[in-house]
Image (cartoon, rainbow, N blue to C red):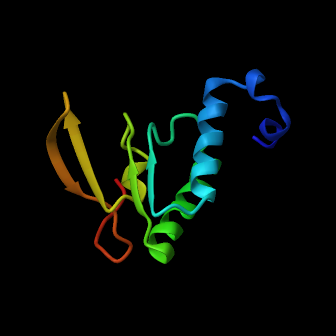
Amino acid sequence: MEAVWKTPINLISDGEKHWLKTVIGVEKDPRVLLIDDYGLSIDPRTEIMLRKKIVKMNNILGTTVLLSSSNDYFLKQFASVIIYLDNGHVSKVRKGFKKNSSYKKK
């Protein structure tokens, strides 16, 4: 992804633009961070780095983080609460991952 920084914005893909917006949002250390389609256009290694940064922002800065995704795979790795929507209505709420809990990956 390093090459993206040197490429004119009109020449990068929509996925790369999404990734750049996410990086810029995270690096500004906001009080509230909202990321739409989390994990959509990033490779697993980059997702792990982004996840660590988001968790650090939440733990150290107290940043409220809201992530949306059509796939809960990444969110289950670190979200404290997962809210599922069905046609705009809450269909279920589940506890997420807690480091000190009995959560086990299946």
Q: Is residue 10 left or right of residue 38?
A: right
Q: Is residue 11 above or below residue 37?
A: above
Q: Is residue 97 left or right of residue 42?
A: left
Residue situated in front as seen by the camera: 89 or 24 = 24
Tell me which corner region of the image, top left, top right, bottom left or bottom right, holds residue 92: top left
**Residue at position x 34%, y 69% from top?**
98
Image coordinates for residue 22, horizontal then vertical, percent: 58, 45
Q: Is residue 11 left or right of residue 97?
A: right
Residue extending furthest toward the right? 6
Q: Is residue 13 above or below residue 85?
A: above
Image coordinates for residue 105, horizontal then vertical, percent: 37, 57
**Residue at position x 85%, y 37% from top?**
6
Image coordinates for residue 90, horizontal then vertical, percent: 15, 41
The quadrant the N terminus occupies is top right
Image coordinates for residue 32, horizontal then vertical, percent: 43, 58
**Residue at position x 27%, y 52% from top?**
82
Q: Is residue 101 above or below residue 48?
A: below
